[in-house]
Amino acid sequence: MPLGDEEAPPKSRIGVAIVDSHPMAIEGARSWLAAEPRLTLLSTGADLETLLADGQPSVDVILLDLRSGDRLVIDKVAELSRAGRRVVVYSEDTSPDTAMSLLEAGAVAFLGKHESREHLVQSLLAAASDRPYVTPVLAGAIVADRSTDRPVLSPKEREALLLWFQSMSKASVARRMRISEYTVKQYVDRARIKYARTGRPAATKAALLARAIEDGLIRPDEIGPDARRSEPINQSGQGETA
């Protein structure tokens, strides 16, 4: 239901909509979000279609329960992603297959309903800035994925991916690497193609990050807010000259 009695948040605040059929879960998330001044809850409801039909142009992130009634809504995650929506999924089902399927469908982040307020808040903040966030549940799913085919990335492909994962735009990555934005896009696309050829597609940024961490190509501590480095990084993690 839209929260019509609340004032519109300043543009510096992140608008959140919650889609969940359990009032208790909604109230719990509401109380957690209320303690974070950078987040504003704009609407809640059990039905995704109704919530979107109400029109919430200032919603930056949708917090979506994986289960709607007796069915999973992975198809809705894909639909929302194609429409340019940022979706964070939370669920009682935290199996590795579920987590990876949701990333492939376009979810920006995934967390279990048992995880802490900090992880929920950080997932929403990261999603709003198009930054991946790896929760403990997602980290476990990545570790549990036992796929054996590992693509080999060139040092430049890895460097471009790492800078991009650190919340840089492709234009910023291009300036940092002293190459064209088109070349940055080529590096990212090449990495995706290599994963697709091994039967482990990574169509979204979050999915590509999960694959790269899983394969040891990127370390989780390299994508934190303080992880940006002053020198380019090669495949082994050592600095390399331009």
Image: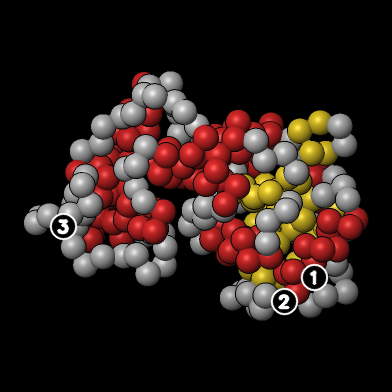
List the single residue furthest toward the left. 241
Distance, label 3 to label 2, CA atoms, is 41 Å
Q: In this view, does 115 lie to the left or right of 140?
A: right
Give the residue drawn at x 37%, y 37%. Answer: 215
Give the residue drawn at x 86%, y 69%. Answer: 4
> Is tag 3's residue or tag 2's residue first in the polypeptide sequence?
2
> Is tag 1's residue or tag 3's residue first in the polypeptide sequence?
1
Q: Is residue 178 left or right of residue 206?
A: left
* Residue 10 percent coordinates (x, y): 65, 78
Residue 171 seen in render: no
Against 45, is 122 above or below? below
* Residue 190 percent coordinates (x, y): 30, 33
Residue nearest the observer in this picture, 222 or 12? 222
Q: Which three-letter amino acid code belongs to the residue tagged 3?
A: Gly
Q: Quadrant of residue 93?
A: top right
Against 227, is 212 above or below? above
Distance, label 1 to label 3, CA atoms, is 44 Å
Location of mark 2 (residue): 35
Q: Quadrant of residue 158?
A: top left
